[in-house]
Amino acid sequence: MSVSAEVPGFLQVLSDGSVKRFVPEIAPASTDFSLGYSSKDVTIDPSKPITARIFIPNAPPTSSARLPILAYFHGGGFCIGSTTWLGYHHFLGDFCVASQCIVVSVDYRLAPENRLPVAYEDCYASLEWLSRVNGTDPWLERADLSRLFLSGDSAGANIAHRVAIRALQDPACPVSIVGLMLIHPYFGSERRTKTESADEGGRSVGTSDLFWRLSIPEGSDRDYPGCNFETARMSAGEWQRFPRVAVHVAELDFLKERGVMYTEFLKEQGVREVELVEAKGEQHAYHVFRPKSEATSLLQKKMSLFMERF
């Protein structure tokens, strides 16, 4: 069997269409209270399937305080990744403690077996699920659904953006999103940026292009609305009602330029509050590869402060 597409160390697509993923170390869910938090895995929709891992900080014995909710979507070019990966587990567990929030981290279906918009639909379904189980699942009894935030890194940040648009445009949406925290967002377009033009034919552009080819609908190009944020069908009034947004970029990240462009685009559309936060000297997804680093701790603090404001 020959290899038709490959991201070395992460993914191989074979000539028969089957996919081989190389899974890094994973972490099981745990109720070890010594960590400062507990986690459990849940099924959102067994027919697809869509699953999630819930992280909840330990409650003081006399506390009845309600906690905000963060719906988190992992990265991986829509083709790889899982909330069970060790880096995500540590990052999100520590974050739920730092921010005193409940984290629901979604494992959506992956491309190329399930091309976009499947990931968007799965992650939107997680919000509908939250609305249904709120008040019935003991792990969510302290959840304050009126303080719902979305976050994600790389492709997951892209998903958070698209889910926010759908929530805004769907009159039947059962929840209201307070804010977005997008970490190293993964966007693209047929038109190259300066950074991409300088790397034309290089590894970064090649990997990015490959993930887009494997994830967008057959027959689409990089101006597909899920890829190119400028092609979203949104009215001026809808943009004005778009949630508050914090965009986190990393100084040494190939995708930094796209993140800055996205920030400026939102401001131009009249989004009520948009801020850009840069991590100096850091690479793409550093918080996943080094979840216990000082830089990751600083990211968690900045995200926590954003949530505390609303």
Image (cartoon, rainbow, N blue to C red):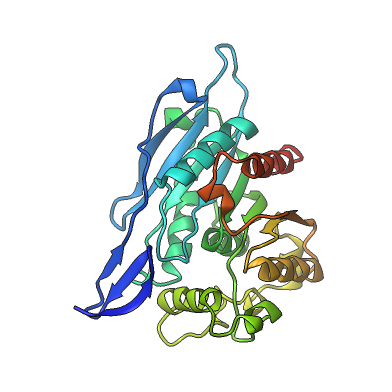
Q: Nearer the viewer, residue 229 or 128?
A: 229
Q: Nearer the viewer, residue 62 or 99?
A: 99
Residue depicted at 73% across the width and 55% down the height: 278
Name above or below for residue 153 compared with residue 66.
below
- Kindly tell me whether residue 113 is visible in this rendering: no
Residue depicted at 38% across the width and 30% down the height: 30
- Kindly tell me whether residue 169 is visible in this rendering: yes
Name above or below for residue 82 compared with residue 291.
below
Q: Nearer the viewer, residue 302 or 177?
A: 302
Left of 81 or right of it: where is 141? right
- The image shows residue 177 at horizontal and vertical percentages of 63, 50
Outermost residue toward the left in this view = 1
Residue depicted at 45% across the width and 77% down the height: 210
Left of 13 or right of it: where is 287? right
Name above or below for residue 103 compared with residue 38.
below
- Quadrant containing the N terminus is bottom left
- The image shows residue 224 at horizontal and vertical percentages of 54, 80
Left of 191 or right of it: where is 265? right
- The image shows residue 306 at horizontal and vertical percentages of 73, 43
- The image shows residue 66 at horizontal and vertical percentages of 61, 28
